[in-house]
Image (spheres, rainbow, N blue to C red):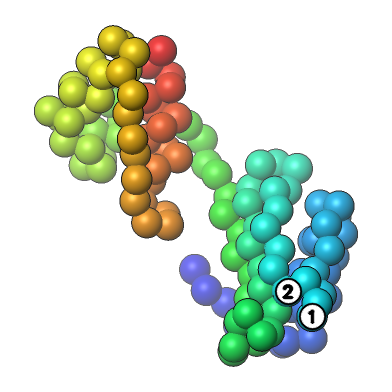
Amino acid sequence: MAATVDEDRLTVAIKNIARTCGDEISEEEPILDARLEDGSRVAAMFPPCSAGGATLTVRRFSCRYPLDDVVDVGSVPVDAAALLRKAVASRQNVLISGGTGTGKTTLLNALAATI
């Protein structure tokens, strides 16, 4: 969900978040990649890295789901889940890739829970 806020307030908020994380963001160092105490990931940019002004993205992680739940919601087909379970059980290497927000971490956590 995207929200629009006043640029000055956003800049102050980003700097406060960076300070809380023990990091810094400025015109000289315009990129922040940090993790909050609750495990959420924070990414922020100042111009010139973000041409339209300052940007802030916070990725909060929800609860972990068992692999069966990931299958039930249609994120992974039943046959693919069976193959992944077998690969993990036999200690095979597994590569999970995808774009931002596609469920890579959720799937990896579900697979890790089968160990």
Residue depicted at 87% across the width and 59% down the height? 19
Whole-number angstrom distance, CA of label 1 to CA of label 2: 5 Å
Q: Is residue 20 above or below residue 72?
A: below
Residue depicted at 66% across the width and 73% down the height? 45
The quadrant in which residue 109 appears is: top left
- x then y, percent, for residue 72: 23, 34
Would you name the residue on which mark 2 appears? 30
Residue lying furthest left in this view? 79
Q: Amino acid at mark 1?
A: Glu
Q: How many marks?
A: 2
Residue 102: mark: none
Q: Amino acid at mark 2?
A: Pro
Residue depicted at 79% across the width and 80% down the height? 27
- x then y, percent, for residue 31: 69, 68
49 lies left or right of 72 = right
- x then y, percent, for residue 85: 26, 19
Q: Residues within 10 Å of mark 2 (few under 14, many from 20)?
A: some
80 lies left or right of 67 = left
Residue 27: mark: 1
Q: Which one is in front, 95 or 78?
A: 95
Regarding residue 5, the answer to whether it shows in the image is no
Residue depicted at 25% across the width and 24% down the height? 84
- x then y, percent, for residue 76: 22, 38
Q: Which one is in front, 39 or 74?
A: 39
Mark 1 near mark 2, Cβ–Cβ under 8 Å?
yes
Regarding residue 8, the answer to whether it shows in the image is yes
Q: Determine whether the residue tagged by mark 1 lies in a helix, strand or loop.
A: loop
Q: Is residue 51 above or below residue 3?
A: below
Q: Is residue 16 above or below residue 93?
A: below
